[in-house]
Image (cartoon, grey):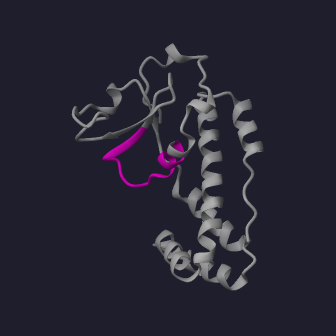
Amino acid sequence: MSVVLDFELYAGWVLDLDAIDVEDLATALADQTDYEHRWLIDPRTGELAFWTSDLGIDGDNPVELDELDLILIDPLPSHVWYQDMVDFAEGISDRGAGERLSRSLVGKGAFRRFRNELYQRHPELITPWHALRDARAHIRAVRWLADEGLIEDDAAQQFAREHDEPALP
């Protein structure tokens, strides 16, 4: 859902991808915390804003989301991020570690168990996991920008071509 006043005003307006903090946008798309805070993006500048229900976006003045001339960034569903963990567990060459990581993904609490298994038993896999997770998150963020019409589709495709997923160990 997009919260934008006067969106027609920005029709045809696209941002330069270099002006957008793709890492922060990826964080916003992954933020499953709650609806007491939300991430938004300014369609004119690409600047991200963090809104809370009690402090607004400036930290001092509460404001309703529908009063802002910004686009609401809804987080991507958790199954998207879950699939990254599945792919990692299935893609690493250490079959024992892969099987333990896969078992950690069964049932409620999978994200926590995966993280615990990784950090406590397989610290050598932390860097490759972060590289895969971040690469995918960045590509998703850029794809989101294109889907929202904030950047040209060609820019998103070029970004994806230039940012391959890292090879797994």
Residue depicted at x 57% and y 77%: 123
Query: Where is residue 105 shown, x and y percent of the image?
Result: 56, 74
Residue 64 on image: x %, y %: 28, 32
* Residue at x 47% of width, y 43% of height: 74
* Magenta-tinted stretch: 25-39
The image quadrant where one finds the C terminus is: bottom right
58 versus 91 height, above or below: above
Does 33 lie within the magenta span? yes
Answer with the quarter of the image where residue 80 lies: bottom right
Q: To which quarter of the image does residue 11 belong?
A: top right
Could you tell me how many numbered marks the image carries?
0
At 53% across and 17% down in the image, what residue appears? 10
Taking the image as shown, residue 51 lies to the left or right of residue 122, namely left
Give the residue displayed 32% in from the left and 25% down from the top. Answer: 67
> Where does the image place residue 120, in percent across and percent down from the top left?
51, 81
Residue 41 among magenta residues? no
Seen from this angle, which residue lies furthest bottom?
96
The quadrant in which residue 57 appears is: top left
13 left or right, relative to 88: left
Q: From what the image shows, is residue 32 above or below residue 60? A: below
Q: Residue furthest top?
A: 9
- Image location of residue 50, percent across then percent down: 37, 40
